[in-house]
Amino acid sequence: MQPMMRLLEIMRALRDKQKGCPWDLEQDFQSIAPYTVEEAYEVADAIERDDMRDLKDELGDLLFQVVYHAQMAQEAGAFDFQDVVASINDKLVRRHPHVFADVRVQNKAELEQQWEQHKLQEREQKQSHNSTLDGIASALPALRWSHKLQKRAASTGFDWPSIEPVFEKLEEEIAELKAEISQPDNQNRILDEFGDVMFVCVNLAMHLGVNAETALRHANRKFIGRFQTMEQLISQGGTSFDRLSLQQMEAYWQESKKLLSTDERR
């Protein structure tokens, strides 16, 4: 039996009403959705670590999530796994006429424009009203959601023409945040203004050709490396955090940065 067919068979067995797994039988789309998101993040984590063995396993876990949702949909009489495969096949062929038809594109910019046009046509067919922002999932991670919203808006021409106005807007939003911080009992306004700062930072990332989500994850990993090195240095020095002043911690922090920078240059 082919591995894919075996996986579908296993999924059906897990959901069998007489002999299936009690936990699997209790699940529905809502209860499984968080696991689907988690598995997608674990795939991304394996890619960031360049761990091919883990990536193979995590892709399998993610594929199982697709099979799980398809099985529940089949039970509800909505669609099955073969319908899911047929849908993505049709979509990929439709969105790549330069590969599967005689359409020619001159460069990457023209290709992206054509891609967005196909997606727009698909949205118009699905939606009863036609907002440019229709179809962007609000359940996305906030940075990714912001990126997709701003990219979609930019496709209409609603964006700064260069990076300089973005920096000006960022400085403006930071000034507004500082003004709200100076006021007492103003947490809601601080939250609002801080969100504006982050929103502009995502736009800045777009203008720089940087993925904000990837950049922040990279910064997180860099922080982990530096902090763990600092912990080792402190331990080697025969002391601990609770015995150090903030200035002493900063000295260890700078030393850890220097050590890691030296290793990166080798």
Image (cartoon, rainbow, N blue to C red):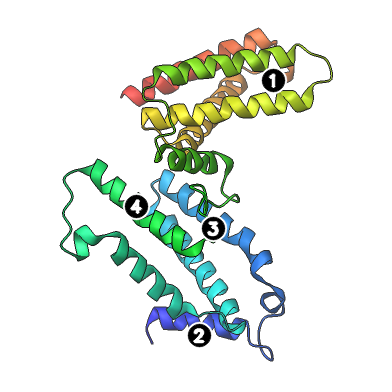
Who comes first in sequence, dot 3 or dot 1? 3
The quadrant of the rendering that contains the N terminus is bottom left
Q: CA distance from mark 3 to mark 1?
A: 35 Å
Q: Which residue is mark 1?
A: 241
Asked if marks 3 and 2 touch (Cβ < 8 Å), the reply is no
Q: CA distance from mark 4 to mark 3?
A: 31 Å
Who comes first in sequence, dot 3 or dot 2? 2
* Eye-nearest disc, 4 or 2: 4
The amino acid on which the numbered mark 3 sits, given as a three-letter code, is Glu
* Eye-nearest disc, 2 or 1: 2
- Secondary element under disc 3, as helix, strand or loop, is helix
**Which one is nearer the viewer's eye here, 12 or 208?**
208
Q: Which residue is mark 2?
A: 9
Q: Which mark is residue 39?
A: 3
Q: Which residue is mark 4?
A: 117
Tell whether 177 sits left or right of 165. right
Q: Residue furthest right?
A: 185
Picture coordinates of residue 163, whole percent (x, y): 39, 21
The amino acid on which the numbered mark 2 sits, given as a three-letter code, is Glu
Number of residues whose C-alpha sits closer than 10 Å to that of mark 1, classed few (under 14), some (14–19) or many (20 or more): few
Picture coordinates of residue 191, whole percent (x, y): 71, 28
> From the viewer's perspective, is residue 52 above or below residue 1?
above
> From the viewer's perspective, is residue 134 above or below residue 199?
below
Q: CA distance from mark 2 to mark 1?
A: 54 Å
Q: CA distance from mark 3 to mark 2?
A: 21 Å
